[in-house]
Image: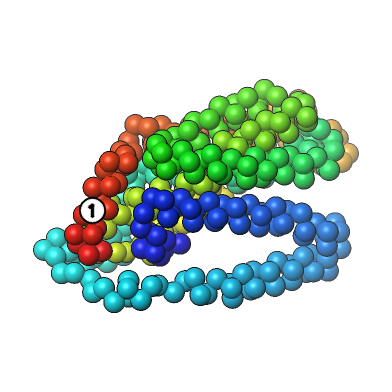
């Protein structure tokens, strides 16, 4: 991920690679949701080992076949890093601090956190919906599948939008429309069939952020490279991943607080859930991810300013700097 901005320079090349990346990631997510449950039997521990072995073997195979693509082009390795007056050798924390002072970095990280929170919270909520709202665990695979299918079929559209109108506009469409779909999702969550249709639309709108996530961050990296006078993609991608991992903490804290204050009953096999707990499940299934995605939309709309014209200027500056 760190070498993405350096290997792929043009907007057309970045969106083409991102579309392939999105396609493969969605296939991986789909297989990851469908295949492990084939091995797993509840309360039979060895079946979890079988599922883990399958996942491990698959990941090792993926790592081996991606090694050739990790190599930088000879022309990139041969380019010496230029010496500039502005270039300063910074420590890791100095570099991160410098990056966080840039408004486009802050805007993108806000949108990215909203995206990761949405994925973590919504997907973790699906078992609660199917178990306590609908009373049918088999619906889990259909709702999750609807989200993934919606994302897959939308990729060509969002790639086209990114190329024609710019990554910023495409990202705004994705975050804004997904927030709207999630609010609708909250009011439809009593009907499993309406929810599956809404989940399909959520996946369709969320396909924008899936498709344009890496091209958009590459634009942010390009601007940082120009300002720093050197490439430090590894630091920036690592820090972005660190920010994204907060979604796991947010999901755990959110569920814990909502379940506590809505009187969720952990001994649900004996006693059914109260109405307040069912409302809490609908809140963390839709409202919480919608709010975080809405924050991402506002950040991209009000703060982020890397328009197509500005990104072109930055790319020209990179060529001048031989970066």
Residue 184 x/y as whole percent: 63, 24
Q: Residue at x 41, y 39 (%)?
A: 164
Q: Is residue 45 visible?
A: no
Q: Is residue 53 visible?
A: yes
- 302 on left or right of 212: left
Question: From the viewer's perspective, is residue 45 above or below residue 259?
Answer: below
The single residue placed furthest to the left in the displayed view is 85
Nearer the observer, 79 or 111:
79
- 259 on left or right of 36: left
Q: Residue at x 74, y 27 (%)?
A: 194
| Image-quadrant location for residue 285 | top right
The single residue placed furthest to the right in the displayed view is 270
Q: Secondary structure at mark 1?
A: helix
From the image, which quarter does the N terminus lie in? Answer: bottom left
Q: How is the image coloured?
A: rainbow
The single residue placed furthest to the top in the displayed view is 187
Residue 43 x/y as whole percent: 86, 59
| Image-quadrant location for residue 9 | bottom left
Residue 100 x/y as whole percent: 31, 50
Residue 150 x/y as whole percent: 65, 39
Q: Please rate how many residues cluster around mark 1, counting C-alpha atoms within 10 Å: few if below 14, some from 14 to 19, many from 20.
A: few
From the image, which quarter does the C terminus lie in? Answer: bottom left
Nearer the observer, 214 or 43:
214
| Image-quadrant location for residue 172 | top left
How many marks do you count on the picture? 1
Q: Residue at x 63, y 33 (%)?
A: 201
Nearer the observer, 122 or 84:
84
Q: Residue at x 67, y 22 (%)?
A: 187
Nearer the observer, 231 or 100:
231
Residue placed under numbered mark 1 in the picture: 316
Question: From the viewer's perspective, is residue 12 above or below residue 178?
Answer: below
Question: From the viewer's perspective, is residue 248 above or below residue 182?
Answer: below
């Amino acid at each position: 991920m760190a070498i993405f901005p350096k290997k792929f320079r043009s907007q057309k090349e970045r969106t083409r690679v991102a579309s392939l990346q999105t396609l493969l990631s969605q296939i991986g997510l789909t297989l990851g949701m469908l295949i492990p449950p084939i091995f797993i039997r509840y309360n039979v521990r060895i079946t979890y080992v079988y599922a883990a072995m399958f996942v491990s073997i698959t990941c090792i195979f993926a790592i081996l076949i991606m090694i050739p693509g990790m190599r930088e082009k000879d022309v990139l390795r041969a380019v010496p890093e230029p010496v500039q007056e502005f270039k300063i050798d910074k420590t890791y924390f100095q570099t991160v601090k410098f990056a966080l002072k840039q408004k486009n970095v802050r805007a993108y990280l806000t949108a990215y956190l909203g995206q990761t929170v949405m994925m973590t919270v919504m997907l973790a909520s699906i078992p609660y919906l199917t178990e306590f709202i609908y009373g049918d665990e088999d619906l889990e695979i259909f709702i999750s599948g609807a989200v993934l299918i919606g994302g897959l079929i939308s990729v060509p559209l969002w790639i086209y939008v990114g190329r024609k109108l710019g990554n910023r506009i495409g990202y705004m469409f994705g975050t804004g429309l997904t927030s709207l779909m999630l609010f609708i999702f909250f009011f439809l969550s009593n009907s499993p069939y309406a929810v599956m249709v809404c989940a399909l639309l959520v996946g369709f709108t969320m396909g924008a952020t899936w498709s344009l996530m890496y091209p958009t961050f590459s634009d942010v990296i390009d601007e940082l490279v120009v300002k720093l006078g050197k490439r430090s993609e590894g630091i920036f991608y690592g820090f972005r991943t660190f920010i994204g991992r907060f979604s796991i903490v947010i999901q755990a804290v959110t569920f814990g607080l909502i379940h506590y204050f809505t009187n969720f009953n952990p001994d649900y096999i004996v006693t059914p859930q109260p109405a307040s707990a069912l409302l809490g499940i609908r809140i963390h299934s839709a409202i919480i991810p919608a709010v975080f995605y809405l924050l991402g939309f506002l950040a991209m709309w009000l703060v982020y300013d890397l328009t197509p014209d500005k990104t072109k200027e930055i790319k020209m500056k990179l060529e001048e700097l031989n970066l």
